[in-house]
Image (spheres, helix red, strand yellow):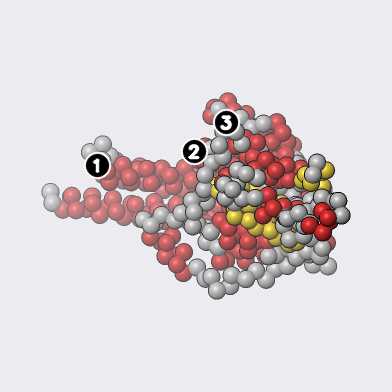
Amino acid sequence: MRNVKELYLKLEEELNGFIFGYENEIRSYILGHLTKTNVALLGDPGIGKTFSATKFAEAFPTKKAKQFFSVQLEPFTAPAKVFGPVDILKLKEGTYELRSEEFLPNSKIALLDELTRGKAVLDALLEIVNEKTYDVNGSKKQSELEMVITTTNFKFDSNHFEAMRDRFLQWTYPKKLDLNDRELIKRYWRKTKKAANVSVRITEEEVAQARAEVQAIEVSEDAADAFLDILIELKKNHGIEVSQRRHDWIFNTIVKAQAWLNGHTEVETEDLEVVWTCLWADEAQIPTVQKVVRKFTNPEKNLINEIFEGVQIKMQGWKTNPVENPTGQVSKDLQLMLNQLKKIKSPKPANLPMYNVAMTLVERSQEMVAEVLHQSQSTI
């Protein structure tokens, strides 16, 4: 029998191999699939949201149900485009049924593209996304749906935002690449896309096995305490409150899946780092939520990120307002930040890439400042 955890990790590796900058989204898809929970991507158009979801679904062949259903929603999208047309032959016999074989109710994974545009079918979608049931002429039908991925460029309006947001456990916010980040842009250009076909295939039996293993994982007391500390700090110090239903949902689903993927027999504190995707209601809250989560789950990474952000702020101030940010003081501050990084003698493997990026940024910033100092001393 194949190792199903290794299959999921291989799928993640493959997708990251040709979808640039989607590490958070791809991990969210996997966590959502393992726990039958939904994922939403909020972000700008043209950054690969739909492509990433479509390629992910290729890995899960099905026997009876439809593997994947995708629909581009518009303000006047008719229910038939989503749920299937009325079966005319059955209607002539006096029975009202839908021909849903190729539509949302008969699909295991679905992509609802531009969900906020589909106002004409939004109420019907609220039910099937959450309950996995749908209404046919007043009768409730059970769908095959296991996971919904939605993408949108816009927030939900006030009447539907909270209701629909609560049906998607994980929310990510992929962004466009910054043209000023020359190294990142060049890495993106060089990223191979010729292998854009997913070779991993995970059978329905293997998916069931993986889900059973995930559900068998318990949450350690340390992890439970850390999660509670995160919720308390977000509410007390930042005014970000998470509903009881939502944090119970998080506690019993994706943290277990993350622990399983990490090879842990129970949820450990570090496995909680993924919960940031579940705790924000507005994209402006993301940096705060990420920082609070890292504080209790990965203080080393939190320190690295603080230094990285501190260097960026320091250099921006030096470039735009050198009077208030004199070169000599900036040089001293950069050396202090470098010393802080060096105290982390052996970063955790997961933190090493960010550590190296932060170290490179500090060293390059020091070189720029040192050159200006040298020039100013030469003119004296």
Of the numbered discs 3 and 1, the one sitting upstream in the chain is 3
Towards the viewer: 77 or 291:
77
Residue under the image location 79 percent in, 51 percent down: 143
- Quarter residue 210 falls in: bottom right
Classify residue 188 as left or right of residue 53.
Answer: left
Towards the viewer: 199 or 113:
113
Residue under the image location 62 percent in, 66 percent down: 14
Outermost residue to the bottom:
194
Q: Amino acid at mark 3?
A: Ile
Q: Amino acid at mark 1?
A: Pro
Classify residue 20 as left or right of residue 255.
Answer: left
Structural distance between the alpha carbons of marks 2 and 1: 29 Å
Structural distance between the alpha carbons of marks 3 and 1: 37 Å
Classify residue 335 as left or right of residue 219.
Answer: left
Q: Which residue is mark 2?
A: 284
Residue under the image location 73 percent in, 45 percent down: 128
- Quarter residue 316 falls in: top left
Of labels 3 and 1, the one closer to you: 3
Towards the viewer: 339 or 196:
196
Q: Which residue is mark 1?
A: 322
Of labels 2 and 1, the one closer to you: 2
Give SS at disc 1.
loop
Q: Residue 101: x percent and y percent?
A: 77, 60
> In the picture shown, does residue 80 fall above or below 248?
below
Give SS at disc 3.
loop
